[in-house]
Image (cartoon, rainbow, N blue to C red):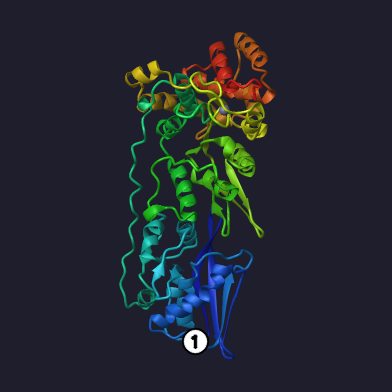
Amino acid sequence: MIAKVWSAAVRGMEGYPVSVELEISGGLPRYATVGLPDTAVRESRERVASALRNSGYQFPARRITVNLAPAEHRKRGTQFDLPVGLGMLAASGQLPDGDWRSRFWFLGELALDGRVKPVSGVLPMAAAARAHGAQGLVLAPENAAEAAAVGVPSFPVESLEHAARFVAGRAALSPARPRPAQDAVLAPDLAEVKGQALAKRALEIAAAGGHHLLLSGPPGCGKSMLAQRLPGILPPLSEPEALELATVLSVAGELREGRWPSQRPFRSPHHSASPASLIGGGQPARPGEVSLAHAGVLFLDELPEFSRDALEGLRVPLESGRAAVARVQDRVVFPARLQLVAAQNPCPCGYLGHPGRECACGPGQIARYRAKVSGPLLDRIDLRVELAPLAFEEWADGAASGEPSSAVLARVLAARGRSEERLGPGRANASLRPSELRRLVPLSSAARATLEKAADRFQLSARGLDRALRVARTIADLAGESRVASAHVAEAALLTAGSRETGR
Ligand SMILES: [Zn+2]
């Protein structure tokens, strides 16, 4: 007999239906899974067999074929255990057949004792179930709220036996309710950062224009403190952004309690992070830090200490807002529209140019350290600020002068409103292409002359000039001016060039 049960799988960010067909026939006992199963799917036989026996059912000693369709995608994960188990009960006559096989979709790993365990990627799979007209999803209690948030009735089952009673009409279940979004955590406030006026200004411009930012300075000058305060001066997470981020988290198995995020993420992976954990990879493809930071902030402290492959891998996400993960069989794409804050020391020991401490590095060491961050990566970072060690006077009277994040946020929102009028919703000045710059950033002759002078002084390349113009546009938006004036260009050139002689 053949039984067909509906389930789902994930490819990248997309869920799709999978029909799990079970055939039990005569002949020598044999178990085969077809339809491009990965190792976890093939191992499902052992889990299902134990779960069946430990739930008081029989595992048929016959010829069993499990077919996962469509066959063109490799099936990954453990979510097919529950549909395989139920299909086997139906095909072997241990469970009455009925319309449950067309009404419900099933997702769940089976423990050896028959318990239903949660799986990752439920959000996109539930979205696929809704799109294909499923009347309900049957899954682990831990996954039920996540599926319910998508708007499909979700029935939590504790075990295979519980699921069998439910589909046979012998156990009543009410659909799970979606859970409210995660509680907002109060972000650290800019008012707590003492001194560093230039860096705070750069942070505000970064927030207003969506520009990537590089902070250079000795240890202890406040680079991490500043970076942690960027999410608090960014516009609130929009609903489409929250959905995309929730989907990334779901696929990564990090959507806690099925509750959607309510705030922009802040991720700060260690410099020992592998390229795969940073950009994405693995089997099945898992989103990397660049995608877990989607719609939020990625902070990379000690940027030159990251591996060369990790740094090179950053270029595409920074440029396109997407991270492509190539696998042997296919290529999946995760969203990665993040804002980068990178930090670096002036040299490996950190004290080059420090007034009170001596740098212990040789010139060759310093050159190698700086060369690790390549020009093409730096080209994608509009703002570069050199932070000085905190002077005692700044530290002593900084506390009273700090402006709260809420005041900065108000200016950022006003500036974003102006740029969105020009560029459309959701787009910030950092996304201005060179062709758009000529049209959308008209310069007065005085501003043009200032730009020319800055190009000469900082030896700005063509890309450097483009960066200066994008930043100047944001500075003008923050000032509420429709035209980019000379003063805006001058400040932009300074913040674009950093203090590096090459002007990269
Ligand atoms: Zn040094």
Q: Residue at x 52, y 77 (%)?
A: 45
Q: Nearer the viewer, residue 401 or 177?
A: 401
Query: What is the x, y in percent for residue 101?
Result: 46, 74
Query: What is the x, y in percent for residue 453?
Result: 65, 11
Work out whether 453 lies above or below 16: above
Q: Which of the 4 quarters of the picture holds residue 53? A: bottom left
Query: What is the x, y in percent for residue 172?
Result: 30, 72
Q: Nearer the viewer, residue 495 or 397?
A: 397
Q: As drawn, is 112 to the left or to the right of 382? A: left
Q: Nearer the viewer, residue 399 or 33?
A: 399
On the image, numbered disc 1 is attached to which residue? 60
Residue 97 seen from this side:
no
What's the residue type where badge 1 is placed? Pro
Q: Residue at x 46, y 81 (%)?
A: 90
Mark 1 lies on a secondary structure that is: loop
Q: Which of the 4 quarters of the picture holds residue 412? A: top left
Instruction: Give ligand 1's quarter of the image.
Output: top right
Q: Residue at x 31, y 69 (%)?
A: 173
Residue 94 seen from this side:
yes
